[in-house]
Amino acid sequence: MSGGGAAAAAAGPLPYSRRPEWADVTPVSLPAAEKVVAIQYTAEHAEALGYWRAVLQSGELSGRVLALTADMIRLNQADYTAWRVRWLCVQQLGADALGPELDFTHGVMLENAKNYQLWNHRRLVAGAIGPSCAAREDAFTREAIIFDEKNYHAWAHRQAVVKITGLWEAELAFADEFIGRDVRNNTAWNQRMFVWKAMGQEARLRLQGGGDDAGWLRSELEYIAAAVQKAPRNESPWRYLTGLFASLEPWASSPRSLSRCAEVHTLCCEALNDCPSCGPAYDVLALFYEGQAALSAAQADTAAAAATVAPGPAQAGVQVVLAGRVAATIMACELAQAALDEASVADPMRTPYWLHRQRGFNDVVALATGVLRSA
Amino acid sequence: MKAAGTGPAEAGPRSTLLVDKHATYIKSFSRLWDTPDKLEFVATEHFWMSGMYWGLSAMYLMGRLGDMDRDAILGWVMRCQHTNGGFGGSERNDPHLLYTLSAVQILALYDRLDDVDADKVAAYVAGLQRPDGSFAGDAWGEIDTRFTYCALLCLSILGRTAAINVPSALDFIAKCKNFDGGFGCTPGNESHAGQVFTCIGALSLANALHLVDRDLFCWWLCERQTKSGGLNGRPEKLQDVCYSWWCLSCLSILGRLHWIDRSALTTFILDCQDEEDGGISDRPDDMADVYHTFFGIAGLSLMGYPNLAAIDPTWALPVEVVERIKRRNEAAASASGK
Ligand SMILES: [Zn+2]
């Protein structure tokens, strides 16, 4: 139906009052109180509004109302009322009306790809089409994303679409493509995480062609390391790194899993070699040591409990283990502290944050030494 | 009255807040529904209600609310209400949660909450909640964490939060939490300063800030400050006055305002002023608008800029107004014997 508007545009739009399909509708003029508003509109807009008010009153949902909404949206793309009525018309007209909506929304997108209403409408249409929407939606969002690589709506639309199509592998490739184009594209990194989370552990391993979680993690850390090498201060891969351990299984349910992974330590040190003033590398390094301190402290606690029940001859051995764990706790705290000290030199603007991170260390050290004394 | 600790030595016209200029600028919108022959207003008609809230709040913070035409504004606001209880962005537009909140905020600013039937508005808001706890913005069904905040705040102002399922609303917000500690629009969407504000605001209203991963999230927030002093909305995006407010209000709610460089941000906001026609823009020397004017002034207020009324970071209303709302709701609750 929107094609009718395009044909008319060549000769200038025909006034609604002279279009035969609208002959039976009496336009509704403005109520007196609203009259002053009228002078704001162009004559064309004002005339269309008269018919628009008439159909809002009658509640008509039809092909001609669909065409009228196109005019209303052309005059104000964010007119959410026009978009709502448009969708009701599409539903009324049935499946045949869906295809033309893809062209209509494409036209709107070319004018303003950040319009909320456009993307919601497109999502409703894609949902109604179902899994066969995949190719069109891929092309549509790709066009928007190439124009603005961080277009929030377009990436969110892809998330909604992949939930319908199930083409997770293709989505991973898409995110990878855009991380490749710009390693600082946080939206693309977010998409990568979104896919892994949605896929789950089993599908993830299947995708890498067998192997185990450790192997998958290693390859992911290599991916991160390569990105860090390109731009060490870029916060995206660093957030992604801590995010992997915090939100993907089996690491998420294993306490301090990041601090159990020696590759993380290596990754931080390599980044600091390349870029000695790298704030985020110090941040993750400190997190790594903090976790190690917590793990050692927990082991010291266990050793202390064992010491209280150990029979005489076993006491000496238990005490050695305990002393070792306590020393490890203290050392990890010191290393974390040192990393945070370096961080406030590297990134002085955020000194209050770096100071905040150091607050707990004295307590941990005091606790650990206390355990040693009491055992 | 230069802001304490404000950066550059050059004392140009933008070194202080140009209150008179901004008041004049905002006043020019005070009867936007009958401003003759201004086509640029037509394109914004669908969000006039929010524009009015931004303008009035900015005027309140500057102590200039009295300059606005109160009776005309209140009359117009009430004409935008629909029979279902919701408010449209203008008289012509359908009811929408965004504008229902703005309308209620305007009534609160003028201490005129008695003008609406709170139960009717609450019924409209409650009708937009989905089984998963999320809220649609209107009958059309767009889902967004912004709307959860709108619903909670609107009903908090009216003392009607019992009308919705708060635990399930919080569940939805929790699902939108990301690995960086921030929040997106719907589950899985990237963290974004605007969404983050609405999620923290909603959690704060529902006394559920324990759901926030404070250190991780506040680190994300202070990473938003760029060398310009301004804050951006996402990594590697440009700083913007409105994003400065979204992040700043979260830091304030979470008690970490001191984690960013406030004097650098103050300088950035002041530098976004239009010293000739008034108003504040997104970045220095861009075109001013009422939206950035409000968020700029609100940000300055949150940082304790001299001679501005204090703003509440959760309610996005002056602290005095929030206190009045709370007293009103307590009185109503004790009158009904609850
Ligand atoms: Zn902005």
Image (cartoon, helix red, strand yellow):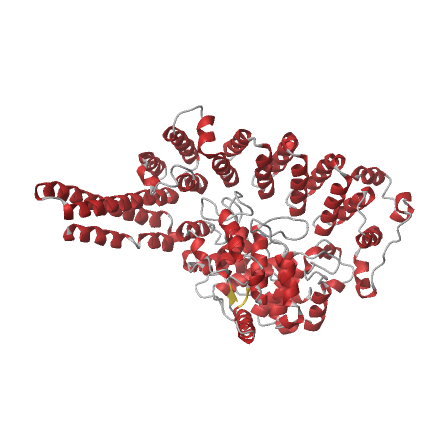
Total tally of numbered discs in the picture: 0
* Residue B282 in view of the camera: no
Q: B113 or B129, which lies in front? A: B129
Q: Is residue A27 above or below residue A141?
A: below
**Residue at horizontal 63%, vertical 68%?**
B107
Name the spot of residue A8 as percent of width and height, x first. 85, 40
Q: Is residue B11 above or below residue A186?
A: below
In the picture, residue A237 is in which quadrant? top left
Q: B51 or A306, which lies in front? A: A306
Q: Residue furthest front?
A: B337
Q: Residue furthest top?
A: A209
**Residue at horizontal 63%, vertical 70%?**
B113
Q: Tell whether B77 sits left or right of B218.
A: right
Q: A199 or A144, which lies in front? A: A199
Name the spot of residue A226 as percent of width and height, x first. 42, 31
* Residue A54 in view of the camera: yes
Name the spot of residue A136 as percent of width and height, x first. 66, 32
Name the spot of residue B331 as percent of width and height, x first. 54, 75
